[in-house]
Image (tube, grey):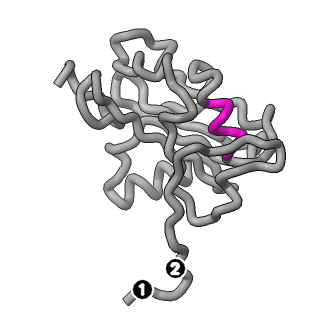
């Protein structure tokens, strides 16, 4: 293990995995935070981005260096409304998408400064989210089945 583990990250500094959520949720990041909290999963994530962009509600939330969730507005409104375009932007400019990078090395997210599209995996139930009309592609993905019936 290369150092202390930060909330929302798995593994040591050399093999660290930062878990983020990009959700198509019109109710914004607060709703996603509540859902994760109720499910007991919030501790595994460090950032949430929601789309489409909404002017009156937070479109993002991140775990700060004190372990508190803070709301912010990621630059979702500057991009086409497609997950592949958003993730391409995340890889091009991690500092715009991860406020933790502004907190410095003490926050434990310096691994994100060298983020590449090859290091991002999208887990989604819609195949259309893996490539956009603009040509942006998600290089690594996992297509999961959608189950619309009541699970017994």
**Any mark on residue 147, and which?**
2
Residue 141 painted magenta: no
Residue, x 34% and y 23% (percent of image)? 66
Which x, y percent locates residue 127?
64, 62
Q: Quadrant of residue 38?
A: bottom left
Residue, x 63% and y 49% (percent of image)? 28
Q: Is residue 35 above or below residue 104?
A: below
Residue, x 32% and y 30% (percent of image)? 16
**Residue 27 shows in the view:** no
Assign the N terminus to one quadrant of the image: top left
Magenta segment boundaries in residue numbering = 84-90
Q: Which residue is mark 1?
A: 151
- Disc 1, disc 2: CB below 8 Å? yes
Taking depth in this image into account, of 112 and 49 the one nearest to the observer is: 112
Q: Quadrant of residue 93?
A: top right
Residue 88 painted magenta: yes
As helix, strand or loop, the secondary structure at mark 1 comes to loop
């Amino acid at each position: 293990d290369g150092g202390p583990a930060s909330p929302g990250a798995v593994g040591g500094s050399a093999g660290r995995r930062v878990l983020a959520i990009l959700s198509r949720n019109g109710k914004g990041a607060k709703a996603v935070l509540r859902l994760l909290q109720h499910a007991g999963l919030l501790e595994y994530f460090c950032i949430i981005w929601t789309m489409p962009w909404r002017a009156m509600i937070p479109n993002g939330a991140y775990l700060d260096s004190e372990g508190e969730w803070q709301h912010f507005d990621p630059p979702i409104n500057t991009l086409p409304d497609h997950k592949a375009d958003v993730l391409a932007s995340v890889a091009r400019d991690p500092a715009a998408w991860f406020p933790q990078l502004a907190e410095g090395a003490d926050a434990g997210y310096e691994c994100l400064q060298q983020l590449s599209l090859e290091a991002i995996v999208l887990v989604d139930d819609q195949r259309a989210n893996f490539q956009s009309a603009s040509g942006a592609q998600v290089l690594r993905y996992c297509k999961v089945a959608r189950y619309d019936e009541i699970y017994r």
